[in-house]
Amino acid sequence: MESTTAVMDAPRYIAMHPNDNVAIVVNDGGLAQGSEFACGLRLTERVPQGHKVALRDLREGEAVLRYNVPIGYAVRDIPRGSWVNETLLKMPEARSLDGLQASASPTPRLAPLDGYTFMGYRNADGSVGTRNILAISTTVQCVSGVVEFAIERIRRELLPKYPNVDDVIGIEHVYGCGVAIDAPGAEIPQRTLRNIANNPNFGGAPVVVGLGCEKLQPVRLFPAGSIPTEEGDSCVVTLQDERHVGFGSMIDSIVAAADRQLARLNLRRRVECPASDLVVGVQCGGSDAFSGVTANPAVGFATDLLVRAGATVMFSETTEVRDGIAQLTARAATPEVAQALVREMQWYDDYLKHGGVDRSANTTPGNKKGGLSNIVEKAMGSIVKSGSSPIDGVLAPGEKLKSGQKGLIYAATPASDFICGTLQLAAGMNLHVFTTGRGTPYGLAAVPVIKVATRNDLARRWHDLMDLNAGRIASGEASIADVGWELFTLILEVASGDRKTWAEQWKLHNALALFNPAPVT
Ligand code: CA
C-alpha cells in the first residue's frame, strides 16, 4: 500500500497494489474538482471520500484493477482524474469452481508466538469461556414471551445471589414449529441451536424451555449427552406439562431450574489460559471502501498473531469471499480443505440460484455510497481479515469446531451480520471482532464484540460505540502492524474481563438470527 503523502489536509489517495489503475480518495468529505495530488494527478470532477479516482486514462473495455484484481471493465473511456463509480464498471463473472485445488507449494506457516495468556473460565470439555453467562435455550418461538418474563425475575431475584455470573440471556429464535423439520437444509438451524447451547461462555449449564407440542421436541434438539449437564433432564422445562397450573407455576419452574444452574455457574473462576484457547470470529458489516484498506488489514494482522499464538480464528461470509475463492483454495493446508471450500461455495451458489439471484445481491446502497462499486471489490477487502496463514479447516453452517481444532478456519455463513454472528456462536466463538465503515451499533449478548472503525470520522462521531480506530492507518498516524498489535492486546484484555466493549457497556445486542434454508409450512 502506498500513500501519496502523510500531511493530513493535502489531497491524498491510497492504492492497494502497484498495478492498480484506480485508487481511493482518503480525505474526509472527499475532494473537489481541480484538487491536485502530490504526484501531479488532478481531479476532473468531485470525488467523494472512499471513492475511486482513475490514476491514468482507461479505455472502454479495459480491466479496472484494485488489489491487482479486475473489479470490473470500463463501460466507456474514462480520462485520468475521473471519478470511477459503479455506473462505469461492468462486473466480471464469478470464477468457475472447476479445477480449483490446494497449491502445490503450500502457504508457509508463520513463526509461533509464545507467552501470551488471558484469564478465562475453563470448561469440562476443554473449551474456555470469556464470560460467565446462564443461557436459557428455547425449542420454539411460542415460549419466548414466557422466557423473557422469567429472565426479568431471574435478573432481579437470583443474579444478586450469584456474583460470579455475568448475565442471563434467552436463546430466542423463530424456529421450532411450522417448519419442514426433515427437509434438506433443516439440519442447519437445528444443529445451530444445539451448538449455541454448548457455547464456551455458557459453561455447559443451560436451561432448556419447550412448549410441548412443537415439532422441535427437546429430545430432538438435545439428544442424550448433547448438553454436558450433570443433572440430566432437570434443566428442561416444558410449559404444557400437567404439573403447570397457571402462568405463575411455569415461571416458578424456569426460575427453579435457573437457580440450580446458576449455583453451578457461580463456582466458575477465571484461571490463566494460553492465548491458544481463544476462538475469535471475525466479521465486517456496514462496509465502505476503507474496510479493505484500514480495519480489515489490521484484523488480518491480528488474525496472524492469534494463529501464531495457537488460537482459533474463524472467518466467514460466503458471498464476500466467493470472488476470492482461488486465493483461498491456494492457501488450503490440505487438498481436503480445498475441496471443502469449493463444496461450501458450490452449495451457496446453488442456494442463491434457487432464489433467482447471485453473489451480486450482497452489496447495499451504503456500500456503494461508501465507494464499494460491487461485490468483487467488496470481497477483495473482506477477505483480508483472514490474514496470511494457511487455512486449516472448513465448517459448514451451524457446525461446531472439533475439540482442540486450532488455526485459521473458514466457517461458511451468509454475510448477513446477525446470521454470521449466530453461526459463529454455534461454532464455538468466545470473542467476536467486527469492522465497520458506514457504522453499525452491532452487538451480541453471548460474547463480547470488539468493534473496529475504518475511518477517523466514524471513530470521532461514534466515540462511545467504536472500540478501536483503524482510520489512523489511512491518515498515516499508525501502521497496519501498529493497529493489529493494539487489537491483539485488546482481545486479550477483553477476553480476560479486564475491559468491557462499548456494546457490553451499553448492553447493546442484536437478536440471534438462524439460517434456515429449508421450507416453512
Ligand atoms: Ca457481515
Image: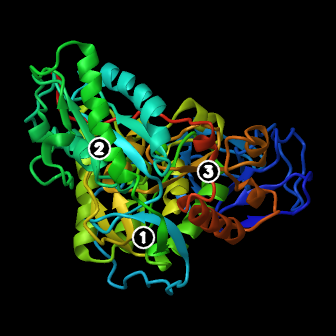
* Amino acid at pointer 2: Arg
Question: Where is residue 62 shown, x and y percent of the image?
Answer: 57, 53
Task: Give the mark nearest the N terminus, 3 or 1.
Answer: 1
Quadrant containing the N terminus in the rendered view: bottom right
Task: Give the mark nearest the N terminus, 3 or 2.
Answer: 2
Q: Is residue 94 visible?
A: no
Please give the label number shown on residue 500: 3
Which color scheme did the rendering employ for the protein? Answer: rainbow
Placement of 53 over or under 175, stated as above or below: below
Task: Give the mark nearest the N terminus, 1 or 2.
Answer: 2
Between 470 and 199, the one lying in front of the other is 199
Q: CA distance from mark 3 to mark 1?
A: 19 Å
Placement of 241 over or under 463, stated as above or below: above
Measuring 60% from the left and 55% from the top, which residue is drawn there?
Answer: 292
Please give the label number shown on residue 260: 2
Between 293 and 493, the one lying in front of the other is 493
Nearer mark to the viewer, of 1 and 2: 2
* Amino acid at pointer 3: Lys
Label 3 element class: loop
Horizontal side of residue 13 vs 145, given as left or right = right
Q: CA distance from mark 3 to mark 2?
A: 27 Å
Horizontal side of residue 370 vs 334, given as left or right = right
Question: Where is residue 378 shown, x and y percent of the image?
Answer: 53, 48
Please give the label number shown on residue 277: 1
Horizontal side of residue 10 vs 99, given as left or right = right
Circle 3 crowding by C-alpha within 10 Å: few under 14, some 14–19, many from 20:
some
